[in-house]
Amino acid sequence: MKIAIATKDWQSVAGHAGQSRFWLLYDLSSVKAGDPLPAPAHIQLTNAEILHYFEDDTPHPLDGVDVVVAGSAGDGFVRRMKKRGADVLLTGETDPTAALNRILAGEALPDQRFDITTTLCKLRDLFSKH
């Protein structure tokens, strides 16, 4: 399983997944219960790869991810990631490692925080091609 966490600064969960350039990618495919978490790969997206603007018809650095974690995301982002095979989990947790540990333990993530950009994205999605 691969889990990608949107971050603002590699240290805290980003509030808006579609505009995040910095991602922590955890490849847990060879991790067994009780093993320590592997160090995440740092994925830095170019402007053209930022998912808010990305064209869906080309490969993306986050392709193959099973779960995306972020503080917020618009409906268009969720639909686009679902088409790429990834589920989106939204959370109020600000610590990426804590969020990952809760997911792996089967615990619920804290409710997401209010983010005005999500509201703006929902409005944008009403009139977009997504």
Image (tube, rainbow, N blue to C red):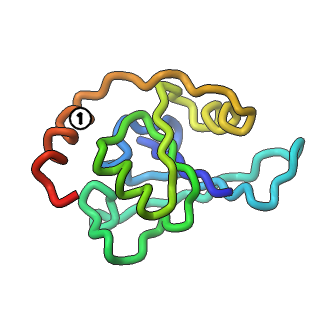
Where is mark 1, residue-wise?
Answer: 117
| Residue type (three-letter) at the residue carrying disc 1 | Thr
Extreme residue toward the left, this view: 127
Looking at this rendering, what residue extends furthest in the right direction? 34
In-image side of 128 versus 73 (left or right): left
Query: Dot 1: what SS?
Result: helix
24, above or below 59, in the image? above
Q: For this view, does 67 lie left or right of residue 46?
A: right
Task: Name above or below for residue 51 compared with residue 110.
Answer: below
Residue at 28% from the left image edge and 65% from the top image edge: 54
Q: Quadrant of the N terminus?
A: bottom right
Please give left or right for residue 103 compared with residue 96 in the image.
right
> Could you say where residue 116 lies in the image, as x and y percent from the top left?
23, 28
Q: Is residue 80 above or below residue 7?
A: below
Residue 100, horizontal then vertical, whole percent = 65, 38
**In the image, farthest residue toward the bottom:** 58
Residue at 41 percent across and 41 percent down: it is 8
The image quarter in which residue 113 lies: top left
Residue at x 61% of width, y 59% of height: 41
**Residue 69, percent across and down?**
51, 42
Q: Nearer the viewer, residue 108 or 92?
A: 108
- Residue name at image x 23 percent, y 57 percent: 130
